[in-house]
Image (cartoon, rainbow, N blue to C red):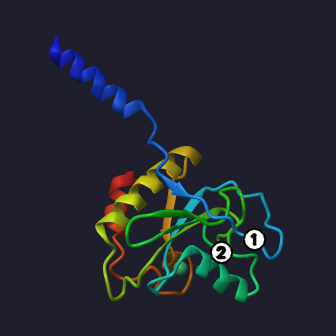
Amino acid sequence: MKSVVRKLKKRMRRQSPPPMPKIVEVDYKWASPLSYTLKPTMIVYHHTAEDNLTPQRIDELHKARGWSGIGYHFYIRKDGTIYRGRPENAIGAHAPSVNSKALGIALEGNFNEEFVTKEQEDSLIALSKYLVNKYNIKDIKRHKDVTNTECPGKNFPFKEIKAELKL
Ligand SMILES: [Zn+2]
């Protein structure tokens, strides 16, 4: 009897969708209107290449490039905190060739020189699982897979993320 209950519980766990991780909302003031036409079919991973960046600072830096504001949809700091960037239905500014179809997730750090923290990796996996399920996404990429760049760095744990997502 006990083993039947255990099996049922296991099956329920398998069928329940991945929970939405905690996402800290940020009140951005867009410099120009966003295009709310994104139906994401891809996720692209980035690093910031710099430490000690708040999401507000990234927003300023991206505005200085003439963009509406922060170009990523999510930003994960070293402590694992996930911040909202652009809304999920707004076209991002992070990988020009695929912005029309891709959500952009950036991690704080330079992963050519350092490693993703355990907290960052846990948050990244939870967020990716949630988004992959929500939008039925089959395609995840590193920035360097779609553009000539080193982003997100050689130490970015792409294989591990892919294995976790079964993609
Ligand atoms: Zn990038």
> Residue 159: image x %, image y %?
33, 66
> Residue reaching furthest right?
33
Circle nearer the viewer, 1 or 2: 1
> Residue reaching furthest top?
1
Q: Which three-letter amino acid code belongs to the residue tagged 2? A: Ile
Residue at image location 53% in from the left, 77% down from the top? 54
Return the residue at label 2.
70
Residue at image location 42% in from the left, 61% down from the top? 124
> As rendered, which of 118 and 81 lies closer to the eye?
81
> As rendered, which of 162 and 71 lies closer to the eye?
71
Image: 124 above or below 5: below
- Label 1, ligand 1: CB separation under 8 Å: no
Residue at image location 72% in from the left, 61% down from the top? 90
> As rendered, which of 28 and 38 lies closer to the eye?
28
> Residue 102: image x %, image y %?
62, 64
- Label 2, ligand 1: CB separation under 8 Å: no
How many callouts does the rendering have? 2
Return the residue at label 1.
29
User: Is 8 on the left-hand or right-hand side of 145?
Assistant: left
Residue count near mark 1 (Cα–Cα under 10 Å), binned few <14, some 14–19, many ≥20: few
Q: In which quarter of the image is the C terminus?
A: bottom left
Residue at image location 35% in from the left, 59% down from the top? 122
> Residue 78: image x %, image y %?
38, 73
User: Is 49 on the left-hand or right-hand side of 26?
Assistant: left
Q: Which three-letter amino acid code belongs to the residue tagged 1? A: Lys
Q: What element carries label 2?
A: loop
User: Is 131 on the left-hand or right-hand side of 88?
Assistant: left
Image: 22 above or below 115: above
Query: What mark, if any, has residue 44 been given in the picture?
Result: none
Give the mark, 1 or 2, whose residue is nearer the N terminus: 1
Q: In which quarter of the image is the N terminus?
A: top left
